[in-house]
Image (cartoon, rainbow, N blue to C red):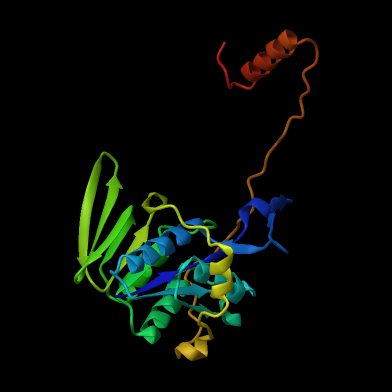
């Protein structure tokens, strides 16, 4: 079985700052998202168990100029090879465009029995891409998987649905999106990091996929941070006096009842 894991690199959110209600991402390094690492770990575990023979990490650069370098983390974690789709027309794609590019790349790879995604990305978390790709490739999809097992020509997953645990299976080829409970991603050691440098890594453009730039179907009107009207009230006196003044202020604002 050949597994393709769709990996997204995102700006490191811990280093993103907000100025004048706008997120400042200039100079912020990118890294593979946490749920993508869960999906990759699930794939590598299946290969190590003998259920799979090859794991390919697939990434759409989405404006990340260093995506080909950042994807090497996936190789260090155990992927056998990696493919990055990098094209100037994909600087700011929406979910529909990303899904169209991934679907075209999977067709070009030809060998794909199981397609794995994180349930959502750490930046937008729309949860759309996995389902869109499954639709474009006419694949059955299992979402919210917290376990992933493959046996014969089926994939079997467990997922938590409020007060019950469902066991769902689908015929291969199939697409599966995983949640964080599925596993604990491994941290590659120095030897794995060094070996990753010699693993196959291809960079494709849209021309290599023989497709034109997908037309975005999403229009963002604004992504400004919410305005905050701070009152800059300072409470003075003893701790008891400050506490009493604080409660009085909350009552005047209608936060607390009298």
* The quadrant where residue 141 appears: bottom left
Q: Is residue 100 left or right of residue 50?
A: right
Which part of the image, by quadrant, shows the N terminus? Answer: bottom left
Which residue shows up at 65% across the image and 18% down it? 252
Of 135 and 48, the residue lying toward us: 48
Image height of 145 relative to 248, above or below: below
At a point 67% along the width and 43% down the height, the residue shown is 227
Q: Quadrant of the C terminus?
A: top right
Which residue occupies 67% across, 63% down?
Answer: 29
Return the x and y of residue 229 as percentages of the image width and height. Answer: 70, 36
- Give x and y (percent) for residue 117: 40, 64
Picture layout, residue 152 above or below residue 120: below
- Determine whether, in the image, residue 124 is placed left or right of residue 1: right
Residue 227 drawn above or below residue 177: above
- Residue 126 visible in the current orientation: no
Q: Residue at x 69, y 13 (%)?
A: 243
Query: Residue 80, percent across and down?
Result: 44, 76
Residue 111 is at least partly visible in this image: yes
Q: How many marks?
A: 0
Residue 237 position (above or below residue 95): above
Please identify the residue farthest to the right as the structure is shown: 237
Q: Nearer the viewer, residue 83 or 51?
A: 51
């Amino acid at each position: 079985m050949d597994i393709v894991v769709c990996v997204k690199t995102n700006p490191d959110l811990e280093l993103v700052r907000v100025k004048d209600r706008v997120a400042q991402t200039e100079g912020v390094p990118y890294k593979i998202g946490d749920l993508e690492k869960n999906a990759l770990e699930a794939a590598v575990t299946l290969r190590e168990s003998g259920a799979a023979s090859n794991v390919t990490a697939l990434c759409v650069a989405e404006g990340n100029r260093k995506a080909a370098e950042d994807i090497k983390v996936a190789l260090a974690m155990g992927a056998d090879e990696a493919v990055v789709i990098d094209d100037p027309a994909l600087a700011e794609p929406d979910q529909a465009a990303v899904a169209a590019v991934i679907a075209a790349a999977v067709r070009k790879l030809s060998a794909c029995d199981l397609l794995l995604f994180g349930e959502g990305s750490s930046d937008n978390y729309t949860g759309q891409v996995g389902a869109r790709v499954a639709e474009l490739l006419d694949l059955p999809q299992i979402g919210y998987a917290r376990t992933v097992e493959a046996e014969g020509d089926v994939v079997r997953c467990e997922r938590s649905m409020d007060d019950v645990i469902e066991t769902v299976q689908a015929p291969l080829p199939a697409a599966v999106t995983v949640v964080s409970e599925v596993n604990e991603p491994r941290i590659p050691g120095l030897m794995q990091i060094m070996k990753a440098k010699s693993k196959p890594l291809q960079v494709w453009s849209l021309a290599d996929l023989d497709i034109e730039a997908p037309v975005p179907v999403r229009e963002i009107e604004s992504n400004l941070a919410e305005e905050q009207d701070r009152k800059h009230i300072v409470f003075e006196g003893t701790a008891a006096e400050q506490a009493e003044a604080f409660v009085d202020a909350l009552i005047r604002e209608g936060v607390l009842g009298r």
